[in-house]
Amino acid sequence: MDVSKPFSENSCFEIETALLAGREHTTCGGRAPNDDIVDTLYTLLVHGVDGARISDGVDHGTRPATHRFPYLVAPNPNPPDLMTVMTALLAAPEPEGEAA
């Protein structure tokens, strides 16, 4: 964290990537509660510092965190039934050529 720089959403690893790229960082860095950290990590691992963004297909939570501490929201009123999800995943046929 660099408190002398402004905050920006989705600035997780901005200081580190700027250092690797040999440029000055422009934000305070750090992670906001609503940052899509998995996409950021996938992108860094696969494409490096300035690569095209990779998505895991999950872009946000069912309810975004608030912008004030303690960042809490009410629980999801319609959470997925995990037994239904797991049953569907286990029943799905395996793609051709990828047998266990």
Image (tube, rainbow, N blue to C red):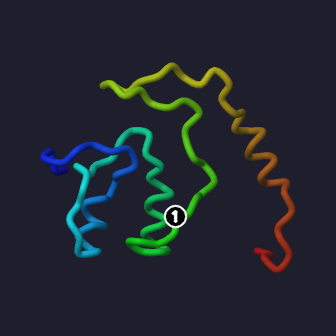
Left/right of residue 4 with respect to residue 84 in the rendered view: left
> What kind of residue is marked 1?
Arg
Q: Secondary structure at mark 1?
A: loop
* Camera-nearest residue between 41 and 54: 54
Left/right of residue 83 with respect to residue 5 in the rendered view: right
User: In percent of the image, x 83 and y 67: which residue is there?
Assistant: 94
Q: Is residue 95 above or below residue 28?
A: below
Q: Extreme left residue here?
A: 4
* Camera-nearest residue between 51 and 38: 51
Q: Is residue 72 above or below residue 52?
A: above
Residue named by callout 1: 53
User: In percent of the image, x 16 and y 50: which residue is there?
Assistant: 2
Residue 61 image position (x, y, % from top left): 55, 38
* Camera-nearest residue between 18 and 38: 18
Q: Is residue 8 above or below residue 53?
A: above
User: In percent of the image, x 41 and y 26: which residue is there?
Assistant: 66
Q: Is residue 5 above or below residue 95?
A: above
